[in-house]
Image (tube, rainbow, N blue to C red):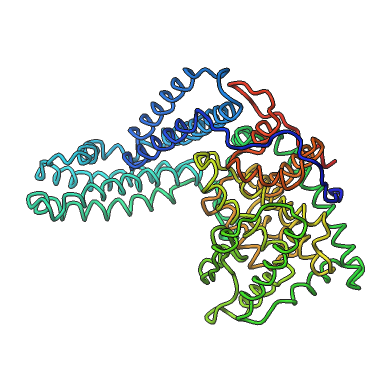
Amino acid sequence: MGLKKTGIIIVAMVGSFATAQTSKLADLVTEFEADNWALNRTYIVDESEEYYQRFSTFYSDWKKKMAGIDFGSLSQQGKVDYVLLKNLMTKGEYFLNQDYNAFKEVDEVSHFAKDIFPFMQERRRGKKPDAKKLAQLFQNATKTIDSEIESWKTKPFKDWQTADKASSVVLSLQKGLEEAYNFYYGYDPDFTWWVEKPYEKLNEKLTAYAEFLKNNYSQNSVKDDGSGIVGKPIGEDALNESLSMAFIPYTPAELIKTAEEQFEWCKNEMIKASRELGYGDDWKKALEHVKNTYVPAGEQPQAIMDLYSHSVEFIEERDLITLPDLAKETWGMKMMSPERQKVNPFFLGGRDIIISYPTMEMDHNDKLMSMRGNNPNFSFPTVQHELLPGHNLQYFMTSRHKSYRRPFSTPFWTEGWALYWEINLWNKDFPQTPEQKLGMLFWRIHRCARIIFSLKFHLGEMTPQECIDLLVDEVGHEYANAEAEVRRSFTTNYPPLYQLAYMMGGLQFYALRNEMLEKGWTEKQFHDRVMQEGRMPVELLRSLLQDLPLNKNYKTKWKFSTAFQ
């Protein structure tokens, strides 16, 4: 299942594609983001009844404010912003309620601190505390924790996720207590004299309490499958809600099926490239050949620069998009630390390109894995993904055009755009040698595998170790690189749909590109307009570019994947 190759379409400009039109809601979006930030800055104990109640009120107030807007009087830009802002609120409230329900299951672990909490609240306005009384409260809480631990030993939590939530409640309290204590300590002599020692004992006990709770769960709950990678599957219901709020009108099963079809297309193309290299149908041997095309230590930055220059020249010769001179002048280059390479084995990008390659202190095998995994042919499709016209151009343009849409950022736009260019350049014969083709296909098949293993993990159908094995056996990763990729997917701050977003976002952009070309646009007009409209789900971008009907309660419905059947 492939994407048909398309030539360059040059047509006369039809109508006006002006992007200067402003939205009446721009300031409202900025206000919502500022309010959200202000409240998070104020209510730092984010696992507390106070926090959840305050943010419930925040979303309730903003829903009332949105209900008072005359939707019909808005321009198309304004209507798009309305739908985006309402969706942002819906998403925030949904996950707040998910977290709140989980909090209520375990909130009794913090009941011992109910008399201490007012101290943290009153600290916000600098109220002078009754130091002697507070010291006694700290002493009492320290003793109470000991009895709490003994009590909880007889009633372990049902699973490790619940235990982890209970632990986070105590850690959140500890964070707030530390902030309040440091405000007075050393500045208020009476406070310092009375509270210093009781606080030290309580703080030490809170650390032990949190650690105990984290491990106090039923033996029937498996936390680590042996891979050493512990993630938190969100389940099918939360996945479906997340997809809807990301404007992806497909079920996880449908997305997995699409990924599997794309996977097979990639594998067939890899076999073709393998035959060109003389390895017959054994694409894994051909991939081994490509891995060994790595450059010597110290020469990777020049290799990256050569690939960058080649891709920019290729794109500008075909006049595919405007690449501002300042954007080409101001991107940076950095080397990745050995510690970061354990989670990100391949180079990253954005404002800078961050190069992953061995350092002197790394183990010999780790050095080879890093060099083999970052060979120039594997890097061939990803330099432009990270720099121009990918992430670096996105950062450059969204800083200058409709920057108020930053809160609407989605990986389907961010990663989808960069992946779209890999698809588009493949279809323009960007790779010329079989090694370059295998390099592009390696990443393409990797993105398909990401959809499969991330969705199945969150559905509870795959363990982290099975995800690693999939990348090694079916994609051709080095083991350490596969392990780092899975660790990055499940143990960092990446949201559950992030790995899915590369390929699906790319397919969305490709489908939209085809629709706009059919309407008489050139590729350059389409690409430039995307960069001028700011961050948003691609379905809403489509509604904007095509002036499609919208309503206040708009739901996702664009079946973009039909363009690839």
Residue 412 visible in image: no
Q: Nearer the viewer, residue 4 or 475?
A: 4
Question: Would you identify the image quadrant in which residue 312 lies?
Answer: bottom right
Residue 216 visible to the viewer: yes
Left or right of 436, for residue 145: left
Front position in the image: 325 or 235: 325
- Residue at left 37%, top 36%? 107
Image coordinates for residue 144, horizontal then vertical, percent: 25, 44
| Residue depicted at x 28% and y 44% | 147
Q: Quadrant of the C terminus?
A: top right
- Residue 327 on image: x %, y %: 58, 58
Question: x, y percentage for residue 428?
Answer: 82, 56
184 sits to left or right of 439: left
Quadrant in the rendering for residue 342:
bottom right
- 517 vs 450, nearest the viewer: 517
Q: How many marks?
A: 0
Identify the residue at horizontal 58%, vertical 44% (top origin). Answer: 233
The residue positioned farthest toward the left in the image shown:
190
Locate residue 271, reporting x and y percent: 88, 62
In the rendered image of this protein, does residue 71 appear above or below residue 221? above
Query: Does 192 sit above or below residue 360?
Result: above
